[in-house]
Amino acid sequence: MTQTDRYLTISATAFAVVAIAHVVRALEQWSIVIGPWQVPIALSWIAAVAAAGLSGWAFSLLFTRQR
């Protein structure tokens, strides 16, 4: 496994964990308050899609490199 493969594996896994955390937050309706501002649940859905996309992209780069 090269350094690039390790980087892609770690990045893809980290983004997948973040995506899962955002989905759980949205489904469980956990509130996040930053100062006087309450973060909307919809923002977690958007962040989950973005993180899942980045994770999928990193995994696809990893799998195409190994061919």
Image (cartoon, rainbow, N blue to C red):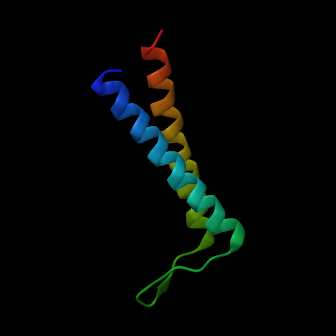
- Give the total of numbered labels: 0
Q: Residue furthest left?
A: 3
Residue reaching furthest bottom?
36
Looking at the image, is 17 positioned above or below residue 30? above
Decide which of 57, 37 is in the foreground and name it.
57
The residue at 45%/32% (across/down) is 58
Please give the name of the residue rendered at 48% of the width and 42% of the height, measured from the top-left corner.
13
Quadrant assignment, res 46: bottom right
Residue found 51% across the figure and 25% down from its top: 60
Name above or below for residue 31 compared with residue 15: below
Residue 37 pos. (x, y %): 47, 85
- Residue furthest right in the image: 27
Q: Nearer the viewer, residue 28 or 44?
A: 28
> Of residues 41 and 67, which is closer to you in this image?
67
Q: Quadrant of the N terminus?
A: top left
Using the image, determine if residue 45 lies above or below residue 28. above
**Residue 34 in the image: x percent, y percent?**
43, 83
Could you say where residue 8 lies in the image, as x and y percent from the top left?
39, 32
Q: Residue at x 43, y 34 (%)?
A: 9
Residue 3 in the image: above or below residue 42: above
